[in-house]
Image: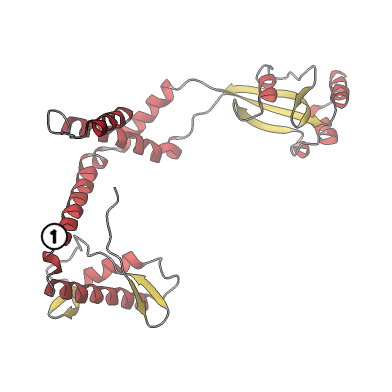
């Protein structure tokens, strides 16, 4: 659930369009916070202006700082003028307004609970431990370092294999004969794991030992291949730093489900529509 933000289009001079920001719940104001303007006696403080300025940064390209401050101040004044007018007309007393405020209150309570009871409980040490656990439990994967020579016909491939049998250098033959994009690098494909190559190629490559090459041509949709394997090794796990954001989401999701499940225990929840209840239960089982 995302936090709501009030927004309205406004025009500064004749060219600048901007969004009116929401009033910050905690502007960081202090007792000696400077007042930069007043609207009917109500102050606009330096901290309020700075909060709004921070929200606007990046939205207006290379606009000079002072002009951007003016945009921020203009939006704050507009906000206060409009809210004053709305209160005088009693718009804050309408049922629609009260309902919306209640919804916003629930959203903010939800967000605060999530931040304090879920996100704040997830430490770097917890994520690293989870990473180590996932790596330890993950099935080991092999990857091979191979070269190949790609030609158009089976006869060409057979001739190349004969040259290899006679001691020719694989990389030099690849540079001379291969039609694939790796020809310039001697047919070098680097390391790859299962699922990265077409099945026919992959099956043969993973059956070879280091230093071996195919004794017969391997046909794929691209042509005929002669394959040589240089090395076989265990695939290196993805570094922790690369998967940390995904791990954080995973752990947060698990903690969320754990916390919410405890809150839902007992007879607190009653769903009148039986069909909807079944659908609800199915969704919760999936989660």
Nearer to us in this view, 228 or 24:
24
Instruction: In the rendered view, tell whether residue 152 sits above or below residue 158.
Output: below
Residue 144 placed where, x, y %? 63, 25
Side of 172 where 237 appears, left or right = left
Query: Label 1 belongs to which residue?
Result: 95
Q: Residue at x 59, y 22 (%)?
A: 233
Q: How many marks?
A: 1
Residue 197 placed where, x, y %? 65, 29
Q: Residue at x 43, y 35 (%)?
A: 240
Side of 183 where 263 appears, left or right = left
Instruction: In the rendered view, tell whether residue 159 sits above or below residue 186.
Output: above
Residue 270 placed where, x, y %? 15, 33
Q: Give the secondary structure at mark 1.
A: helix
Nearer to us in this view, 138 or 276:
276
Q: How is the image coloured?
A: secondary structure
Crowding around mark 1 (Cα neighbors within 10 Å: few <14, some 14 to 19, many 20+) is few
Q: Residue at x 12, y 33 (%)?
A: 268
Quadrant the C terminus occupies? top left
Q: Residue at x 37, y 75 (%)?
A: 65
Residue 218 placed where, x, y %? 76, 22
């Amino acid at each position: 659930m995302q936090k709501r933000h009030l927004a309205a289009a406004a025009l500064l001079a004749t060219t600048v369009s901007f969004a009116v920001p929401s009033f910050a719940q905690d502007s960081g104001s202090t007792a000696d916070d400077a007042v930069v303007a007043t609207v009917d006696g109500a102050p606009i403080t330096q901290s309020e202006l700075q909060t709004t300025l921070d929200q606007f940064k990046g939205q207006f390209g290379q606009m000079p700082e002072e002009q951007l401050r003016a945009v921020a101040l203009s939006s704050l004044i507009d906000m206060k003028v409009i809210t004053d007018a709305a209160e005088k007309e009693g718009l804050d007393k309408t049922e629609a307004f009260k309902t919306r405020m209640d919804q916003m209150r629930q959203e903010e309570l939800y967000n605060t609970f999530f931040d304090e009871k879920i996100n704040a409980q997830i430490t770097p040490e917890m994520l690293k431990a989870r990473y180590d656990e996932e790596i330890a439990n993950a099935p080991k994967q092999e990857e091979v370092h191979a070269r190949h020579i790609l030609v158009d016909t089976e006869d060409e491939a057979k001739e190349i294999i004969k040259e290899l049998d006679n001691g020719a250098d694989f990389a030099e033959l690849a540079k001379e004969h291969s039609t694939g994009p790796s020809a310039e690098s001697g047919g070098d494909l680097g390391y790859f794991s299962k699922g990265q190559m077409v099945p026919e190629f992959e099956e043969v490559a993973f059956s070879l030992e280091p230093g071996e090459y195919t004794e017969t041509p391997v046909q794929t949709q691209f042509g005929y291949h002669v394959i040589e394997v240089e090395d076989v090794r265990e695939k290196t796990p993805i570094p922790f730093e690369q998967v940390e954001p995904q791990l954080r989401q995973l752990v947060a999701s698990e903690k969320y489900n754990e916390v919410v499940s405890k809150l839902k225990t007992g007879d607190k929840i009653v769903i009148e529509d039986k069909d909807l209840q079944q659908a609800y239960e199915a969704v919760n089982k999936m989660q």
